[in-house]
Amino acid sequence: MSRNAEEKKSRLYGYAGKILRINLTESTTEVIDSRKYLPEWIGGRALAHRIFWDEVGPGVGAFDPENKLIFTDGPAGGTGIPTGGRAVMCGIGANNLPEQYTSSSIGGWVGTVMKYCGYDAIIIQGRAPKHTYLLIEDEKVSFLDADGIWGMLISEAQEAIFLAHGRDTFSMVIGPAGENLVRDATITTSNDHTLSKAGFGAVFGSKNLKGIAFHGTGSITPYDINKVLELRLKIGDYHHVPNPVTHQTALKSIAYNIPAPDGWDFGKLACSPGCNSRCQRLMMNMKDAFTGEKIAQIEKCVSPMAFTMERDCFMPVGTWVQSPRNPRSMGAQRSWGIPYDENDPDYPVISEMWGGDTTNYWKGDFDKGSMMDQLCKEYGIDKWDFIVWNMTWISMCKKEGLLDDLDFGMEPDPESAEFVRYFIQLIVYRKGPLVTLADGSRRPIGDVFAEHMARAIRLLGKEKYGDSIYHGRYSHILKKNIEIPVSLEAGWGQCTHWHGRGFQGCQKWFWTSNAILHMLNTRDAMSSGHTHLTTDELRTIQKEGICHSPTQIMAIRRTETVAILTDSVPNCEWQSNEMFYPEQNAEQFYAATGEDLTPEQLLMRADRARLVFRAILMRNHGRCRDMEVEDAYPFLTYPDPAGDTVDWEEWNDLVDMYYQSAGYDLATGWPFRSTWEKADLGYMADEMERLGMLPPEGGTPGYVRKECPFEGHVRKKEPAVTGNAG
Amino acid sequence: MKPGNHIIQAPMEYSLCTGCVSCEMLCGLLHDGCIGPQHNRIFLQPGRIKQMVHKILSCQQCDDHPCYEACPRKDQAMCLDLKTNIAYINESECIGCGKCQKACHFTPSRINLVKSRNKDERKAKKCDLCRDKPDGPQCVKWCPAMCLALSEGPIPWDETKEEQA
C-alpha cells in the first residue's frame, strides 16, 4: 500500500507533525511545525540535538529554569514497526559531573501516546510557580495543581492520574527523589520504564513538575504498510510463540542460585508499543516492600544484582561479537530461548565466557533484593547507580574500615535489609545525622549522597572515600586478589558500565572501545551503544593490536553513529543487528516516512547529529581533548580480570586514532572546518570560528602530547604555591 | 473446523499479554491505514501499575446484537453477516451517532467511535473479525505472544459490567 508522489509530498508520513513548546513559568504553549526539522533531523535524539543547539546557549545549569528538556519520539513510533516505540529525553543532566547536555531513553507507552496527541516532541522550559503536572489532551494542555500527588511514590502517582483522567491517559512521573532534587532521580512510566541515567527526574523536580500525562486521540500513518508488515516478520520472527508464565522457586543464572522462600512467577513483557519482542522480565507474586501484598516488578539487566553481588556480571563474548551463523546477541538469544548454532566454526569464540571477578559485595537474599529494586523504582532513583555504585561503595568501604568516621545513624551493612531501606530513605529525603565534610562544613549524610556519588565522594574527601583500594576483589583468571578503588567511577561522574573492572568483567578490546565511547559522551554511554563486532573484526583487532587497531576505531565510530540512529528512528540495540542486517534502520525509516535513503545516507544524517552534539559540548561546556582524555583515564589504570590496563601513551594513541578518523584536531579534539562542511554544517564551523574553536586544517602547529598528569591512579598534586602570592 | 466467532485472550499460563498493543496497532493499520486509539476495534486495558496483567477487550459478537438493534440506519450502517451471525459496520453509511456504542452490553463498550469536528469523519468502529481477510482476524495473526484466539465458547456475560482494573 505505497503512496503516490503527490500524497508523499503533501504530508509527513510517520510523524505527528507538530512540536509543542511548554513554558512552565508562564503556563503557556506554542506549536511549531515539525517540518522545520523533520524528516531532515530524523527524530528522537538527532532532533533533540538540533533543537537544543538552536535554543540553549552556554552557562545554563541543570536546575536553571533556562534548562530545556526535549522529549522526542521518532518516525517509527506509533507505526507498528517493531522496536519503534521507545522515546528519548535530552537536556542538561543533573547527575553528570560537571553538569552537561545529555540524553536518556525510555520505553513504555508515553512516547507513542505523545504522538497520538499530535506531537513529535515537546520542549519543556521554565519553572512552574507551584507544584504542577501537565495534562496534554491533543491540542489542549492543562497546567494542573500537583499538590495532591506531590510526595507520592511512582506507582501511586500514576494510579492517581489514571483515576483522575481515565486508564487511557498515560503518564510519566517523578517520585520523592526527583521532588527533592536527588541528582540520580528518574522519570518513570508504567511499572519500571525510566529516564534514569541523566538525573532528569531532579530536573523535573527543579521545575516543580511532578509529571506529564498524555491522552491522545490522533493517529499516525506510516508510508508503506506492506513494508511495516514485512519488518514485523523480519525483525521479530523468533518471538512468534506463546509467552507462558512459569513458576520459579529460585532466581538463577550462571553465577548465582538464590532460593525464593515463597516462589515467584516469571513472565515477559514488551518494552514499548508495537514491539514484537519481550525483553522485560516480569517477576510476579513478589512481596511489596511497603504493604507486603503480592505485586509484580519489571526487572532489567542490573536488577538481579540487587539480589546478590558476590561476583561480577559476566557474559559470553557472543553478547557483543556475532558470526554469520550466530548473528544475534547471545545474551538476548539466551533470554529469548533461541538455540545457538553450535556447529558454527566460530562458536568456540563467541561462547567463551568472559572472566567475572569475585567481589563479595553482598550475599544472595531474595527478599532483600526484591525490596532494593522496588524501593529504587518507587522513590524514583536510578537503580544502576544505587546498586552498582552506592551499595558497592558501602560494602567495600565497610570491609576496608573506612566508614568508622561517618555516622549513618545505624550500622552500615549491605547485607541488612533494614539498612538498605534506611539508606535509600536517607538519600531520597536528604536527611540523617550530620557528617563533617572535607572542607569542614557539616551536612546530613543523606543530603550528601543525594548529590550523587561522584559529588558525594568529593564532598567527603576523594582521596579516602574514592581512591582507597578494596582488597577483596579476586580474579579467577589470575588466581589472586587484584586492586579496585572503593568508588566505581568511570568518568563524567558516572558509574562503571562494561568498563571491565569492578562490576563487569570483559576483554580489553571491549572496555577500551566502551571507554572511548564514554569519553566522547557526557554520561554512561552504554545506553543504546555497546560496541558490537563480527568475529572476523575481533580477529583483526587482536592482530592489529587493540590500542593501534584501525578496525577498533571503525567499530567505535560505527557504534557511536548507530547508537544515535537507534535513539532517533527509533530502534532497539538488542533487536538490531548492524553486523548482518545493516539495512534495518533505513528500512524502518523508509516504511515510516517514505524517505528512501540508503543505509549510508541515513548514517550520514545520524553522523551529522553526532557532530551537532559535539558542537553543543564545545560551545556550552568547553569540551576539548584534555577534558576527555583525563576524565576517562584514571579508572582504566586499575586491572581488568586478566590484569590488563592501558598506560597513558596507549590511551592517547587510541584517542589520536579516533580523532584522526573523525576529522578532529589532535591538540584540541575540535573538528576542522572541512569536517563540519562535509556534513553540511558549514554554519557551525562559522560559529566555532567566532568562538575561537576552529583549529587550522592539518592541525594545531607544534602540538606535542601532554605529559601524563597522573601518578599511579590519581592526579599528580599541583606544586605548592611558594613565595608571595600577592 | 468451524471458525469461532469472538476474540478471546488466552490465560497467562498459556501466554501472557506482553502489553505491546500490536493487536490495536495492526487493527487500525489494516482496516484504516493508520494507527491511533480511535481506530482500534480491539483494546488493551492496562492492568494496575503494580501488576502489569493487561486485559484485551473486543466485541464478543453477542447473539442478540444490541448494537445492530440500536442503529438508526440498520442494515445500511450496522449490518448483519448472515453467514456468521455477526454485526459489522458499513462505514460509508455510518453517521457516527454513537447509539451502537451506548447499546453495547459490555462496560467499557467494545465499540469505538471516531470523534471529529468534521461530522463526516465521525464513525463507529467495531470488530468484524476481519471478514474481508481470507486469513481471518489480523489481531490474532499478528499477536507476537499468540495470546489471542477465536473462540466458539459461550459469550462471557459475567464480564459485561466489569469494573476498570
Image (spheres, rainbow, N blue to C red):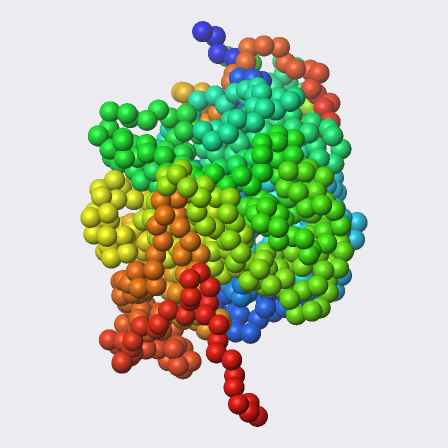
Q: Quadrant of the C terminus of chain A?
A: bottom right
In percent of width and height, residue A606 lies at: 36, 56
Please indicate whether residue A387 sits to the left or right of residue A175 in the image: left
Is residue A636 visible to the viewer in this orientation of the structure?
yes
Q: Is residue A10 above or below residue B120?
A: below
Q: Can residue B132 be seen here?
A: no
Q: Quadrant of the N terminus of chain A?
A: top left
**What residue is shown at x 42% (from left), y 53% (from top)?**
A638
Can you tell which quarter of the image residue B163 is in? top right
Vertical order, A662 against A638 (above or below): below
Please tell me which residue lies in front, B40 or A547: A547
**Which residue occupies 44% across, 56% down?**
A635
Determine the residue positioned at 53% across, 90% down: A723
Pick the residue in front: A273 or A28: A273
Residue A580 placed where, x, y %?
Answer: 27, 39
How many marks the image carries: the answer is 0
Q: B131 above or below A516?
A: above
Q: Position of residue A485 (x, y in %)?
A: 50, 53
Q: Residue furthest top?
A: B1
Relative vertical location of residue A1 with respect to residue A260 in this rendering, above or below:
below
- The foreground one among A182 and B160 is A182
**Which residue is found at the position 68% from the left and 56% from the top?**
A405
Q: Is residue A531 left or right of residue A434?
A: left
Name the outermost residue toward the right: A148
Q: How far across and how far down the image is residue A18, in percent?
A: 52, 56
